[in-house]
Image (spheres, helix red, strand yellow):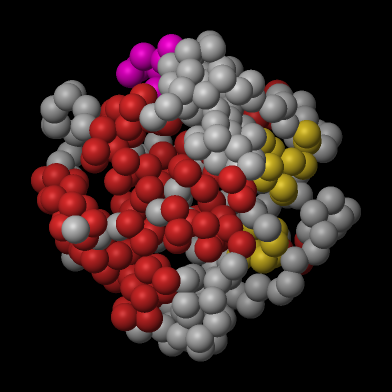
Amino acid sequence: MRSAFYALVLSALLAASPGEAVSEAADAVRGEYIVRAAGCITCHTQKDGQGAFLAGGRALVSPYGTFYSSNITPDARTGIGAWSDADFIRAMRHGESPQGQTYYPVFPYASFSAMRRQDILDVKAYLFATAPVRQENRPHDLRFPFSWRFSIYLWRWLFFSPPEETSEAPLTAPEQRGRYLVDVLGHCAECHTPRNIAGGLKRGKALAGTRYGPGGSVPNITPDSETGIGAWSVGDLMFFFQTGLKPDGDDVQGEMREVIEDGLRYLSKEDLLAIAAYLKVVPPIQHAVRPAKRHGASSYHDDW
């Protein structure tokens, strides 16, 4: 029943894929599918049932300090209930609040900047259909100089740009769909790509893994045969997306387990195949990811 339901949603997604010329009428059902594809639930809901659905407050520990996710329920005072369509699009594509405050790039608006307008409006329709929760956003706890908000403007000047094409060869239609799911909606590079000292993604190592991702080391997901997923078949990848089980029988833990449970396992077979197909054609990068150091350590040079 669930697969048939999402197959209908997929057909609507593909029908709207060619460009921006889509209806302004928002679809909350389609929006839920996109929310799951984008991993919104994992970041904006606290772990282990400690907080309300999408009410934020989840701690995201990083080398720059601890970020706390925001309340994206339709509560008018503490959530996004008072936001207009223009406000929501501005936040998703430009990383700015309705009041003009710039968000820290832990909110992956650099990836979302390439989202289709209709997808953004459908996401908003779904979020506004969820239960409002009155919960104030918790302030971030960041190390200097990242605690200085002016540093965000420097980061934007240096690094803020839509996701780049990572495949060197022309893409098939399924691979193009996979690129949109991986590079834009899923914002996989935000966790699976090393960052420099200023927090910018190292584009030359896109998807090659890092020691300092959420929760620790994040693996290389390029098709390198030695350090990445080059030995995984498309079938291996699809099974992993649905179950969290790797080809060697081990199961994934941590944040990726939640990404699968809250998002990937709900996607259609066609979309999972598209993701797998795209990951098999991105440039292979040999990059062995070593165990993570403790966040807050003074040196991160071996990942730069």
Give the quarter of the image for residue 85. Answer: top left
Magenta run includes residue 125: no
Question: Which segment did they paint magenta?
Answer: 82-88
**In the foreground, 9 or 105:** 9
Farthest residue toward the right? 298
Q: Is residue 235 above or below residue 7?
A: below
Tell me what residue is drawn at x 64 percent, y 42 percent.
50
Query: In which quadrant is the N terminus drawn?
Result: bottom left
Residue at the location (38% across, 48% down)?
Answer: 36
Residue 209 seen by the camera: yes
Of 225 and 85, nearer the camera is 85
Q: Is residue 116 visible?
A: no
**Residue nearest the viewer, comparing 129 with 295:** 129
In the picture, the quarter occupied by the C terminus is: bottom right
In the figure, 239 relative to 267: above or below? below
Dividing the picture into quadrants, the one containing residue 234 is bottom left
Residue 108: x, y in percent? 51, 41
- Position of residue 120 in the picture relative to residue 76 (left or right): left
Image x and y of residue 22, in percent: 14, 31
Please state if 291 lies on the left or on the right of 126 as rendered: right
**Residue 132 position within the rendered picture, expressed as x and y whole percent measured from the top left:** 46, 23
User: How far from the left and from the top, in percent, is residue 208?
Assistant: 54, 68
Q: How many marks?
A: 0
Say which residue appears at 46% left-offset and 85% top-offset.
247
Q: Nearer the viewer, residue 102 or 216?
A: 216
Residue 150 in the figure: left or right of residue 177? right
Where, by quadrant of the figure, is residue 293 drawn?
bottom right
Q: Residue at x 31, y 52 (%)?
A: 180
